[in-house]
Amino acid sequence: MAGLKKEDKIVLETMQRALNIAEQHGVEELRREVKWRCNNQISPPGVNRNALIAIGRDLADKELKYVACSMAYTMTMDMKTPPSLVHDFLKKFNERMDIYRDDPEQFEADAMKLDADYGMQAMIKRYVEEE
């Protein structure tokens, strides 16, 4: 980082910290960190907290793209699902993500439904045992 302005170094260090949190602890932990810093108006000296929020959102968006691409690829290439069904699935997936962004309580309700679903729990348990 030699030759960079002090402000640029601070921004790069902040981005690196955000990336480290996301890689080591996941995107949810990064969201909590950003939310906590914003609520307490804490950010590194010289770093606009809105820039920190933008970095967090960008990392979360990338993670979501990885999940969607992985699902689509798995369904299409590995499971040989017809493209029209994959398209419908991805549309529903994106709609559900929008719902969860707008209404976190709906996410909690849906998560509880999945937790209560015995078949889903059995499948998850089997998957974990296979790993």
Image (spheres, helix red, strand yellow):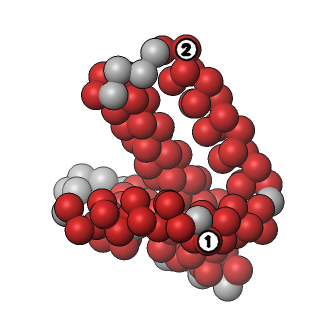
Residue at horizontal 50%, vertical 61%? 119
Name the secondary structure under disc 2: helix
Vertically, is 94 above or below 29? above
- Residue 127 visible somewhere in the drawing: yes
**Mark 2 vs mark 1, CA separation in Å:** 30 Å
Residue 125: image x %, image y %? Answer: 35, 68
Q: Residues within 10 Å of mark 1 (few under 14, many from 20)?
A: few
The front one of 46 and 42 is: 42
N-term mark: 2 or 1: 2
Residue at horizontal 79%, vertical 54%? 102
Residue 15 occupies quadrant: bottom left
Q: Amino acid at mark 2?
A: Ser
The front one of 73 and 53 is: 73
Residue 116: image x %, image y %? Answer: 61, 71
Label for residue 84? Answer: 2
Label for residue 116? Answer: 1
Do the residues bearing badges 2 and 1 touch, measured as CB atoms within 8 Å?
no
47 sits left or right of 19 in the view = right
- Residue 34 visible somewhere in the drawing: no
The front one of 54 and 23 is: 23
Residue at horizontal 58%, vertical 30%? 89
Q: Amino acid at mark 1?
A: Ala
Vertically, is 79 above or below 57? above
107 sits left or right of 55 in the view = right
Picture quarter with the C terminus = bottom left
Residue 76: image x %, image y %? Answer: 38, 22
Picture quarter with the N terminus = bottom left
Residue 35: image x %, image y %? Answer: 63, 74
Mark in front: 2 vs 1 = 1
